[in-house]
């Protein structure tokens, strides 16, 4: 289980604060795949960073009773001056994994070839996303944090990623953020809507999608 207890998260902006969560309390129960819907700028990526612990709330507490992955697509996961192989080795050691096994898996899965030994700062965003997928899949997490925006590569590589996650989802949970209801339907059995500093959880994906559409419609009406 992952629980947020009276969490407030904001960023200073010109003329005030941009609030992502405002004294919010909620929990993601184990045994479910959650999709989080939200418009652009609602704070979906920030939510993933809060869940992973790579970013901290301004107030409140996030409790994790699970081994949670780093957020896929978060550039802060890797050190830009180290190579892909060195980054994979570092992450493996952080999580107490066998570094040689992890790097072998990453080399095979990512298909980065000689780029695996080049600095991350020379990678395209797509190559960084491939590395993030490879490293995350090389380690058994209880909960995987996934950003739809990390879908990269050609059709064959996207299918490869999807198949790997399908297999992993048989024994792990997924928390996915997206603005695309079709993606949420494809992966998740529960969903939530992030808007106006609140995260509202729903027992069904359809309920969340309906609320999200109403919010988006009122914002553009």
Image: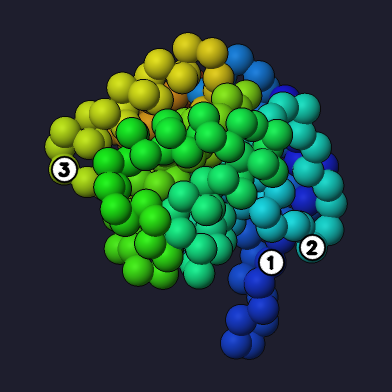
Helix, strand or loop under label 1:
strand
Instruction: Using the rendered image of the protein, determine whether residue 122 is visible from the camera's viewpoint.
Output: yes
Q: Which residue position is annotated with label 3?
A: 154
Q: Are marks 1 and 2 in contact (CB under 8 Å)?
A: yes
Density class for disc 1 (Cα within 10 Å; few <14, some 14-19, many ≥20) is some
Instruction: Using the rendered image of the protein, determine whether residue 143 is visible from the camera's viewpoint.
Output: no
Closest to the observer: 186 or 73?
73
Alpha-carbon span between mark 3 and mark 1: 36 Å
User: In the rendering, at what x and y percent does residue 199 appear?
Assistant: 62, 44
Q: Earlier in the sequence, mark 3 or mark 1?
A: 1
* Residue at the far left in the pictured view: 155
The residue positioned 61% from the left and 81% from the top of the image is 13
Q: In what quadrant of the picture does the C terminus appear?
A: bottom left
Helix, strand or loop under label 3:
loop
The residue positioned 24% from the left and 36% from the top of the image is 158
Density class for disc 3 (Cα within 10 Å; few <14, some 14-19, many ≥20) is few
- Front position among marks 3 and 1: 3
Q: Which residue position is annotated with label 2?
A: 58
Asked if residue 75 lies left or right of residue 184, the reply is: right
């Amino acid at each position: 289980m992952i629980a947020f207890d009276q969490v407030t998260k904001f960023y200073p902006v010109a003329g005030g604060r941009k609030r992502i969560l405002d004294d919010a309390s909620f929990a993601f129960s184990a045994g479910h795949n959650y999709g989080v819907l939200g418009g652009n700028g609602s704070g979906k990526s920030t939510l993933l960073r809060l869940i992973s612990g790579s970013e901290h709330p301004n107030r409140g507490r996030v409790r994790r009773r699970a081994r949670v992955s780093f957020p896929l697509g978060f550039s802060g996961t890797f050190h830009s001056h180290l190579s892909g192989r060195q980054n994979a080795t570092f992450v493996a050691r952080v999580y107490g994994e066998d570094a040689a096994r992890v790097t072998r898996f990453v080399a095979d899965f990512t298909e980065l070839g000689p780029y695996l030994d080049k600095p991350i700062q020379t990678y395209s965003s797509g190559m960084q996303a491939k590395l993030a997928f490879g490293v995350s899949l090389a380690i058994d997490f209880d909960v995987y944090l996934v950003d739809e925006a990390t879908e990269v590569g050609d059709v064959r590589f996207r299918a490869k990623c999807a198949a790997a996650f399908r297999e992993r989802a048989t024994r792990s949970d997924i928390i996915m953020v997206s603005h695309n209801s079709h993606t949420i339907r494809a992966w998740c059995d529960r969903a939530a809507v992030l808007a106006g500093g609140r995260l509202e959880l729903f027992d069904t994906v359809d309920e969340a999608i309906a609320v999200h559409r109403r919010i988006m419609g009122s914002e553009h009406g």
